[in-house]
Amino acid sequence: MNWSSNKFYEGKLIADKSVKNHLLKDLKNISKKENDDENLSECSLFLIDTNGYDMKEIYFDDENSHGNEGEVELVNIHINELIENYSLSIDQIGEAGFLSDSRRINVAIKRARRHLCIICNVQILTHDPFIKRLIDYMIQHGQIHLAFEFIDGFYYFFYLYLKKRVKHGGWWKVTKFHEINGNVAIEFGTNSYVHSLDNGLFCIGSTRSFGEGPEQQQILTAIRISENKIALKSGFRKYLAINKNGLVIGRSDAIGMREHFEPVFENGNLALSASNDKFIRFNDEGDPVAMDDRATEGNFIQIQLPVEEQGTIRETEINYVKKYQKFQDKKLRINQGDIKNLVDAKKHGSLHEVLLDRREQMKADRYCK
């Protein structure tokens, strides 16, 4: 606070010894990562110069203040970098910390006049009963959005920061078994997904560009069939299985023992075990085979889920329309048919297929059959 003290208080504003030199690195459980070249936890002042990057201000007719969307994005990026580098995992935290002080929350909420926005990790904070009631109230009376909805229009000079967050085009990886349900994409390597062929075979798709999600033929439907096993269905409405040679094929009309797959999470890695208790990888010929007793780097996968399928059934369809429809007159066109079939489809793992059928009926859709 030296600058403010000298500028406004004739040097008389002095920090107490207990906080005079405190830094992020002094917080409990904070540890510097090996690849943290910026030493952010040891830096108390941080200036980002935006000169030359065309971050233009925006003006409002009824307001005296200005806005700058580019600088807002930079604030968001910087905060996320701090959080990603130094925060604990959800399993380690499990508590709301100082936010559990209801008086602090009360003061913060009452200060909002025209707009109240809460940005938080719901999964962490709902461990606290008081915070959970607040979040439940926000969901009931307001709007809830996922952070992925706002990832757009970033600047190239922060590419290294961003590639970890947006490279999958808004799809996010699962970390626990219970998250696997409905539409999924299985990623081998970096931005390359299992690709369905119309003959019931599979290949590894070409590498997707930065910011692109999987193609239509790379989207599978996952159906949980037990506490640790799933079945997978291709976009051609056939279930995946392995043949006698361990080759993964998609030609089954029903789920039997051969159609069982087990996602195995261990030490931050994920591999897929087939019904023969072998792990799947792509062989030298480019075919997916279940041949390995132990999972190594070639077996490791990421299972990605689409953000647009979060929320109610109607919200899911709206998100699909926004993603695929070509807005020639800037009007959103939603299929007005009964959504009961969508509800049933989600329960039975065929939501993607039914959404495709409903989209096919819309003339402005450029991506349908």
Image (tube, rainbow, N blue to C red):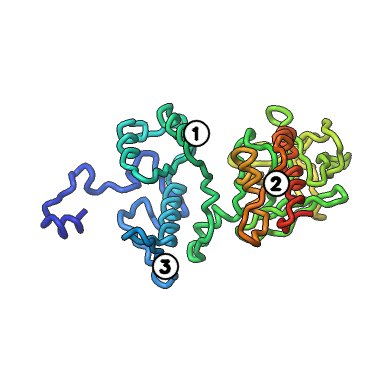
User: Where in the figure is residue 271, as x and y percent of width and height?
Assistant: 69, 41
Q: From the viewer's perspective, is 30 left or right of 20?
A: right
Judged from the image, the secondary structure of the residue bearing numbered disc 1 is: helix
User: Number of labelled discs?
Assistant: 3
Labels 3, 1: front one: 1
Return the residue at label 1. Answer: 140
- Tell me the crowding category of disc 3: few under 14, some 14 to 19, or many 20 or more residues within 10 angstroms, Cα based: few
Q: Secondary structure at mark 3?
A: loop
* Residue ID for mark 3: 56
Label 3, label 1: how many angstroms apart (C-alpha)?
A: 36 Å
Q: Few, some or many C-alpha atoms within 10 Å of disc 1 (few <14, some 14-19, many ≥20)? A: few
Circles 3 and 1: CB distance less than 8 Å? no
The residue drawn where x is 83% and y is 43% is: 250
With 295 as the anchor, is 91 left or right in this view?
left
* Marks 2 and 3, the one that precedes in the sequence: 3
Label 2 – label 1 distance at C-alpha: 26 Å
Say what amino acid the circle numbered 3 marks. Answer: Lys
In the image, 62 versus 178, the foreground residue is 62
Under mark 1, the amino acid is: Gln
Quadrant assignment, res 180? top right
Which residue: 66% across, 55% down? Answer: 191
Residue 31 x %, y %: 41, 45
In depth, the one of 283 and 68 nearer the eye is: 68
Q: Nearer the viewer, residue 30 or 332?
A: 332
In the displayed image of the protein, which residue is found farthest to the bottom? 52
- Amino acid found under the numbered disc labelled 2: Asn
Q: Position of residue 281 (x, y in %)?
A: 75, 47
Confirm whether residue 128 shows in the render. Answer: yes
The structure residue drawn at horizontal position 62% and vertical position 49%, both measured from the top left corner, is 171
Q: Which residue is mark 2?
A: 335
